[in-house]
Amino acid sequence: MQIRQTNQVFNFDKYLTFEKDIDLKQRAWIEVKGKAIETNVRQLRSKLSKNCQFMAVVKADGYGHDAKLVSDYAIKGGASQLGVATLNEGIKLRSSGVKKPILILGNLYTKRDLIISFKNDLMPTISSIRECLICNNIGKHFGLKFSLHLKVDTGMSRLGFECSEFVQQFEKIKSFDNISIEGIYSHLSSADEINSLDPKSNTQLQRQKFQKLLKQINVDRNKNIKIHLANSAGMLIDKNFHFHMVRVGLSMYGYKPLSKINNNLFLNPALFLKVKVAFIRTIDKGVSVSYGGKFISNRKTKLAVLSIGYADGVPRNLSGKINVIHNNKFYPQVGCITMDQMMVDITDSNDIQVGSTMLLLGSDGDKTISPLDWARESNTIPWEILCSFKNRLPKVQVD
Ligand SMILES: *Cc1c(COP(=O)(O)O)cnc(C)c1O
């Protein structure tokens, strides 16, 4: 099929098989540097004692980076275990060939889910005797031991055995023949708060409560049980939080949860959010931009329309509060961020064209925009920014 357009012959057939070579960088996309993850894990591990293991937390599709890619590079950097939130996240990793131990951090409470977890060699987190009994029955049925981690609540009031009841319940659990207790853990509620070094802070109190409990159950005699408490912030506070393993998410991706702590860590952000300029227009002074017309130009303004919006995971309440980078220069975003597009003032540029690539998150030269910046501006936390990116944004590895 050929069509003569103006005076150019256009071959359409070439484009009829487009599914085969879909252009991932056609609109907006996430670039992930696997090597950055590997280096971050290595650096973080250098702060741990030799016997302390590193669990790479890859829930929520690896905090929006692609769980399989993150797992592979984290393992290269020395991670010996992986943490996911859901059964399906675990199954997906197993079926993509990941062999390391995987702990499901969320709660499985049906027999069906626990059987599926067992069959996929995933360790569930157990918070009650009832779930323990189900696991024991499953193990018995298959003539094997069901590996799992027990969780105790030390101040989060989310999952976990009640601390005051655990000592007694642990005695009972120890008598179950068809489970294998691989770990006992708890989770910190406030480790990323600035007072977490203060001996009276919730974080320190949680640690003390956990340690007291471990003493009561005489955990030293159960040497194969891995004890763990720390998330990224907990790990960075001090060694008292490390025990036999740390469960690290945010800082493995290159961000510090605690700005106050200075421990010579130079973490590399692994995620770059990029977008194409889809259109350029020039508006006069006094013209309104985007829904609600809240931005009005105070000069003749050149606008770039970028193909990304809140349906891709850019929070709408960042409207008018962020910059975008091009060739080591910042350009302000103006007007409301819409579902699929946003406008940027590029009046001061002479090198941006339709099809140019602009950077929303990441570094270019000495300019950096971090999810921490976005979180501050939109009154949330970097964790939420990272896991809000939608499937519409393809992930491209760039090592
Ligand atoms: C998400 C999660 C982590 C990792 O937290 P970061 O602050 O991202 O390091 C650790 N433990 C549990 C139980 C979690 O749910």
Image: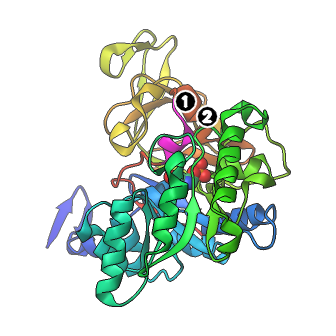
What stretch of residues is rendered in magenta? 380-386
Residue at the far bottom: name it.
143
Residue at 35% x, 90% y: name it.
Answer: 143
Residue 322 sits inside the magenta stretch = no
- Give the residue drawn at x 73%, y 58%: 242
Q: Judge: label 1 CB < 8 Å from ligand 1.
A: no
Circles 2 and 1, Cβ within 8 Å, touching? The answer is yes
Is residue 224 visible to us here? yes
Considering only vertical position in the picture, is 129 above or below 220? above
Place of residue 353 in the rendered image (x, y in percent of width and height, measured from the top left): 49, 43
Quadrant (top left, top right, bottom left, bottom right) of the C terminus: bottom right
The residue tagged 2 is: 373
Residue placed under numbered mark 1 in the picture:
322
The residue at the point 43 percent across, 12 percent down is 296
Q: Which amino acid does label 1 sit on?
A: Ile
- Any part of residue 86 in sight: no
The colouring scheme, among rainbow, by chain, secondary structure or one colour, is rainbow
Left or right relative to 159: residue 207: right
